[in-house]
Amino acid sequence: MASSDLLAEPAAIASPTRVNDFSIQVATVNGSGSQTANLVLLRSIFQMGVPVSGKNLFPSNIAGLPTWYTIRANRHGYIARKKEIDLLVAMNPETAQEDVRSLEAGGAVVYDETLKLDQVRSDLAFYPVPFDKIVAEVCPDARLRRLVRNMIYDGVLSRLLGIDLAEMDKALTRQMKKKAKALALNLAALQAGFTYASEHFADRPVPFAVSRMAQTRGLILIEGNEAAALGCLMAGVTVVAWYPITPSSSLCETLIDYLRKYRMDPETGKATFAVVQAEDEIAALGMVVGASWAGARSMTSTSGPGISLMSEFSGLAYYAELPAVIFDVQRVGPSTGLPTRTAQGDIAFAAGLSHGDTKHILLLPASVGECYSMSIEAFDLAERFQTPIFVMTDLDLGMNNWMAEPFPYPEAPLDRGKVLTPEVLQAIGEWGRYKDVDGDGIPYRTLPGQFGPSFFTRGSGHNAKAQYSEKTDDYTDNIDRLLRKFETARTYVPQPEIDQQAEARIGIIGYGTSHWAIVESRDQLRDESGVETSYLRIRAYPFTPEIGEFIDAHDRIYVVEQNRDGQMAGLLRQELAGSQIAKLTSVRHYNGLPIDARSVTQEIRAHEARMAMPPETSPEDAIVGAEEAV
Amino acid sequence: MSTPAVPTPPKKVNRINLEPATYRGAKTTLCAGCGHNAISERIIDAFYEMGVEPTRVLKLSGIGCSSKSPAYFLGTAHGFNSVHGRMPSVATGALMANKTMLGIGVSGDGDTGAIGVGQFVHLMRRNLPLIYIVEDNGCYGLTKGQFSPLADVGSTLKNGVVNDLPPIDICALAIELGATFVARSFSGDKKQLLSILKAAISHKGTCMIDVISPCVTFNDHEGSTKSYAYAKDHDEPVNEISFVPFFEDISVEYEEGSATPVKMHDGSTLVLRKLDSSYNTTDKLEAIRTLHETVRRGEFATGMIYLQPDATDFLSLLNLVDEPLALLPQARTRPGKAVLDEIMEKHR
């Protein structure tokens, strides 16, 4: 019997107030198998054709601490985090009371009946469920109950929200198809939850509902780390050296799985790649640099603390001109910081990572699609510019599931950059490893064991022929050429994405995952206050001329980012004219949670209100004026 | 009137028709009399005599006096003077990228024993095919003579400062960590060092060679345990080494029982004549015991300390294709569209 046959007439449930526009928060304990239940819930809404996003808020711990998973379903396609929680699934006794108190009035709570949460507030709809009793009926083996208990709330939600149970079955089967016994148990738990809700809540109104749409047709759901790993696979990476660190571990782990599956020589079964789990991040980047020196496409992935350790090798790779692809899946710093929370806090640090005058190329993906495409671009840029490329993603993008168009197969061939060939040698006459023969700052390199003269690679001072030199002119000529190379990069890196509204006096600049909150915030500003805005999304550093032009075209610019110090605004100030700098205001969000639209809207609105007030002269201003008069 | 032409003597070449000069590097900038220069000379001799094509060699180093020396040998080989204490990781990456190259890394006692001890540990564990030479003078020469962690207890600096911390015995450490070729020599012992280096070229795995190499400027005085005089007096060879390369058809004469022939990876033969009747180079416990006993006697053991000629090396473990990874064309490193489609389908 198909589970969908059990669907009661929808009329039995009073007409819901909000269709395809609400957020669910599931509060559990980590290590209790809630991830499966949450992904099934996310995926089943996605399969119903409703735009959806899921964000995991988890502790730096293996088992036993509170964890929250937030799902937002939105018919308009808004997928940024939303602060307000509409529907709570309270499975964790420790946080239940507080979780209930955090709900919006008119919300709903599905909870373990023993928690008696209906006594906490009276302005919510409550749905008590006897989880222990139900799980005992479904799962005779007491030891396994803990792992299937959470699937019951999926069944309950299926019934309450009108998510087709067949879609839940499908999503669950997809996740557990290799474990027949576990699948059978979980399917039974799902069904039991659905049945319980049908029998007990059929006559209760539910404030929210899911209704079939066609907004997700053809789309995929994927985590950013996996998307980046796919990019590395398609970029033809051959050497991977990494060290485990949250939130980047799954990037290399997924990549390794793909390499093992798709990159064994069909003839011999031998690997066309080498992977090492290094002893630390220093060694990881050392291996990457050594491999690229010998001509391999190599990468590593890390997060804040690892990036700190990589600074010396980053400087070496910049100064000795060696390619490297480094993924920084950013988390909250400084120091150990909040290892399982998101931020854009490494931007300024990565841009100049090393002692001495150093400038690195950064790529700034905002979506899983860009995690994929920019990974491929990163390898091309690394070899084209013979320098490290930092792909700055973050925990929110890397470790959460996002909807996307399926990734396109790369059209362009790999760009292996300027490697000396007999033809080039004939054309340029005399080769020097660090000689700028094309005027773009990029020299030709030779690779060990291949065509062309050898040279000595070093992190110490060198002249155009790669000979050791402490001569002042040799140093300045070389370091100036590196700057010229960086200027050339402006025309190669991904260009900004611009939506310029002719009427808009306000411009918003953002990058990375802030994008989703900005898109929604612009609609809020327009629909709620009639304020039109333009928007420029930075996709790379070095900056491109469009940014200056965009600033010039507007009266006020809000730079939105997820760090305390307005790091991107700081990098912009280094390059802008004084009149442009005066237009910048930072909108900063740095509490470790993904940025939400409402926060951006409120901050811009408050600042606009201050701008509209007549300027007052404070006593301090008067004193300054007096001093100047002297 | 013409003078009869004097025939020019034939040029000295090795088995691949290269002259000794091909194996030389830039002029040294180290101090006159520095032990490191003697080691560079032996490296040149070993590669010339073994007939290794210099352009098939990767030379690597970290930072310090010793790390400058790759510039002074095999001038036509690609070299990489990396960062302090981190050469092992760079060598690991480079050899993974091109497993057909022969790697030689030069480090120092500070570069290895202090800042680099972490990477040293993991290099030994992995058994990467790399000749890893520690030019060991017990001090930091480039920063004017501070102690390194390899300096002996009681050794003094020129200004009278006494070292009161025990040294790291990197030979014992390397054996403990799983290194498969561990030797110690003295920069002044031409014959022994040359034999060890030739054997190292024949070995497939990490060759850890600790070479006592006195610093004439900062650590060659009375009271130093790494001076020329001290090394000459306290050098205690555990064996006498004869090396017969695979391309020379020579049978070695040795007394049964007193000498052991060891077959190297490339087919060469290493004959070890025992100086101490109980010493067995392939016995780990024996090697570590001997190292401790010589230290107790105030001596240092030299020669072939430990050898495991047939252990699996790191690159073999990776089961790589025959061609260097660095040279693989796009057709072999970028999967076809069907692969991406299959993966995308799974995420729908």
Image: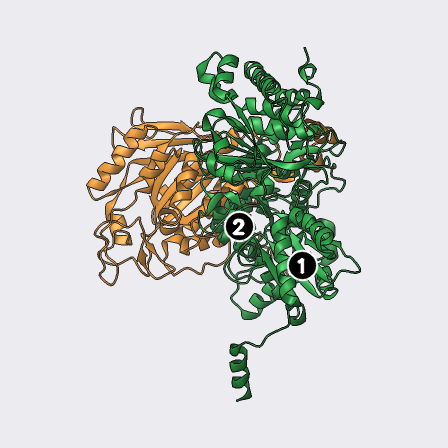
Chain colours: A green, B orange
Direction front: furthest residue? A122
Write down the chain letter for disc 2: B
Q: Nearer the viewer, residue B30 or A456?
A: A456
Could you say which quadrant of the image residue A467 lies in? Answer: bottom right
* Residue A455 visible, this angle: yes
Kindly identify the residue that appears in the image at 73 percent across and 31 percent down: A49
Q: Which residue is mark 2?
A: B79
Residue type at mark 2 is Gly
Q: Which residue is mark 1?
A: A543
- Against A19, residue A513 (above or below) is below
Q: Nearer the viewer, residue A380 or B119?
A: A380
Q: Nearer the viewer, residue A282 or A106?
A: A106
Quarter holding the C terminus of chain B is top right
Task: Mark 1 vs mark 2: tell me if same chain.
Answer: no
Residue type at mark 1 is Phe
- Against B1, residue B71 (above or below) is above
Could you say which quadrant of the image residue A603 lies in? Answer: bottom right
Direction left: furthest residue? B297
Marks 1/2: CA–CA distance: 35 Å
Q: Residues within 10 Å of mark 1 (few under 14, many from 20)?
A: many
Residue A468 x/y as whole percent: 52, 61
Q: Residues within 10 Å of mark 2 (few under 14, many from 20)?
A: many
